[in-house]
Image (tube, grey):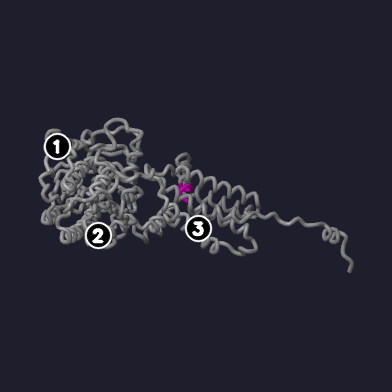
């Protein structure tokens, strides 16, 4: 049989080989699609910058996830690797950028208030991206555009995460005076004062306070926070001074807070100059860092935290979050249970230790009952109440987690006092509770009652021969100064006890919180009284 002319002509014409694209143009967007949410979450809690080790964990961990997804989601990879990688990249991008799609749905529903628009829009966008990828993923132009575009997003987000906190040079370590006591500073996040616990939560905290008194503590029964949010409250305590003052927020306030939380603040430098070594227990909060002055760093389970954030960025978030406790809760529980071991661990003879632990208890989520057993429900997991009807229930959950916290604190302090009886201890809340906060309320929409609740904190001090320096209305800044004076023999003057209300977003005016509540939260201390308390050994 003779070949047809058309067949012979086709056989004689050379066929151009298909254009190929380097595989890196697919691997990079696939990994970057998962990395972007991690980087965004890492920089989301301004004013902190992303930590280097956290970024490394994100990149390494998501790279492994990308390879697994690549193998699981594609067929015929070797034969159609370019198409398979393209479709996989878009699928992963949709999976890990789902919050952006749902945000688009909310915006459309605001403009077009029709039923189900909010749910239909993200699904339609995702379907459109997948359709486009299935039709065009094998083309080199698609690879080039998606690859370079995703790399550009990663670069932009990485630049946005800078600058990192400058590496501070800690003070040189001196030689400790003979008999220098160990010092423990324990910050219990969101721990309200006894008055608020009684009126808002119908909770009597007197038995806990009496057991602390039996261990040598003085209770500051009318203590109040210096600030209503953790960044400012902690950095002020570490710097032994206020970081925000009344009036317009200073432009350098946030860098000052970063330096205090991540560098070598005045408190740590003072103790280093006095010959102390510094132990620091990180937690799962972005502002918790082992700074340059820290000698012993107890890490915070960063792998678990990164996985939590990454899973929370996907459509699988409800499943993952219902199965795993929030890192705030689990990491803080572990650190509180191990606190006494850190305080009493072996060290160089004659070298005292300052141990600083900030645990996010009894702060939400409220995943522990009074016996510290894991308790899970949607209302317990929420950081703010979903509705007015749920406030009473959440107050009960807060009281349960408070009881768990009390038990662990007493166990830790009993072990510390038993092993090292001369240990000086400061236990304080950074700010109070927020039981009336609703998910639907704006970030700075606080009522006078909720402000008063937020600024009332628990305070307890074990100072040995310096016990008379504690007074009922002491705030954490002055508490830290008293601790330094007592342990180091320094002569820091006390500052006026102020409770300042600063906007959480870093914009606006700082005001005296007492002017925003229905009445004075504490009896103000006179400057003369404060100066008198700061005099003497």
**CA gap, disc 2 and disc 3:** 38 Å
Question: Quick one: 484 or 489, which is closer to the camera?
Answer: 489
Residue lying farthest to the front in this orientation: 175
Element class at badge 3: helix
Magenta segment, prevailing SS (helix, strand or loop):
helix
Residue assigned mark 2: 369
Image: 267 above or below 329: above
The number of numbered discs placed on residues in the rendered structure image is 3
Residue that mark 1 sits on? 530
- Give the CA separation, mark 1 to mark 3: 57 Å
Q: Is residue 253 visible?
A: yes
Q: Which mark is residue 293?
A: none
Closer mark to the observer between disc 1 and disc 3: 1
Q: Earlier in the sequence, mark 1 or mark 3?
A: 3
Foreground of the two, 505 or 317: 505
At a point 27% along the width and 59% down the height, the residue shown is 368
Which residues fall within the magenta stretch?
A: 97-102
């Amino acid at each position: 049989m003779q070949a047809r002319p058309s067949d012979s002509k086709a056989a004689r014409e050379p066929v151009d080989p298909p254009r190929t694209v380097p595989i890196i143009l697919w691997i990079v967007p696939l990994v970057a699609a998962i990395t972007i949410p991690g980087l965004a979450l890492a920089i989301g809690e301004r004013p902190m910058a992303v930590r280097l080790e956290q970024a490394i964990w994100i990149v390494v961990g998501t790279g492994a996830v990308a390879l697994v997804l690549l193998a699981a989601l594609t067929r015929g990879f070797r034969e159609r690797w370019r198409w398979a990688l393209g479709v996989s990249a878009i699928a992963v991008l949709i999976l890990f950028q789902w919050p952006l799609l749902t945000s688009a749905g909310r915006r459309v529903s605001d403009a077009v208030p029709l039923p189900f628009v909010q749910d239909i829009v993200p699904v339609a966008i995702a379907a459109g991206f997948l359709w486009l990828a299935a039709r065009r993923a094998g083309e080199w132009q698609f690879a080039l555009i998606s690859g370079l575009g995703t790399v550009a997003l990663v670069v932009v987000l990485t630049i946005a995460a800078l600058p990192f906190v400058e590496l501070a040079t800690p003070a040189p370590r001196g030689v400790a005076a003979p008999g220098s006591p160990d010092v423990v500073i324990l910050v219990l996040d969101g721990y309200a004062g006894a008055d608020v616990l009684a009126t808002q939560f119908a909770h009597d905290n007197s038995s806990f306070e009496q057991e602390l008194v039996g261990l040598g503590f003085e209770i500051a029964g009318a203590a109040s926070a210096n600030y209503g949010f953790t960044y400012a409250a902690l950095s002020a305590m570490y710097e032994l001074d206020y970081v925000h003052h009344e009036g317009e927020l200073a432009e350098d306030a946030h860098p000052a807070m970063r330096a205090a939380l991540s560098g070598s603040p005045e408190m740590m430098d003072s103790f280093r100059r006095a010959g102390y070594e510094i132990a620091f227990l990180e937690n799962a909060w972005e502002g918790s860092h082992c700074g340059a002055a820290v000698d012993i760093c107890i890490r915070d389970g960063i792998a678990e935290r990164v996985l939590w954030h990454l899973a929370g960025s996907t459509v699988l978030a409800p499943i993952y979050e219902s199965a795993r406790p929030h890192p705030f809760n689990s990491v803080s529980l572990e650190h509180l249970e191990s606190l006494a071991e850190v305080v009493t661990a072996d060290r160089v003879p004659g070298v005292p230790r300052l141990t600083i632990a900030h645990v996010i208890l009894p702060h939400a989520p409220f995943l522990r009952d009074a016996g510290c057993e894991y308790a899970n429900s949607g209302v317990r997991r929420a950081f703010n109440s979903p509705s007015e009807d749920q406030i009473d229930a959440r107050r009960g959950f807060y009281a349960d987690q408070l009881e768990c916290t009390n038990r662990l604190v007493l166990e830790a302090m009993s072990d510390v006092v038993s092993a090292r009886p001369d240990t000086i201890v400061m236990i304080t809340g950074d700010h109070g509770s927020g039981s009336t906060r609703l998910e639907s309320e704006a970030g700075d929409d606080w009522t006078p009652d909720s402000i008063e609740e937020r600024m009332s904190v628990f305070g307890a001090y074990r100072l040995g021969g310096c016990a008379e320096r504690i007074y009922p209305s002491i705030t954490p800044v002055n508490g830290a100064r008293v601790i330094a004076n007592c342990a180091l023999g320094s002569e820091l003057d006390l500052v006026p006890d102020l409770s300042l209300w600063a906007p959480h977003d870093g914009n606006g005016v700082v005001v005296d919180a007492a002017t925003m509540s229905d009445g004075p939260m504490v009896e103000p201390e006179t400057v003369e009284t404060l100066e008198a308390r700061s005099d003497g050994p």
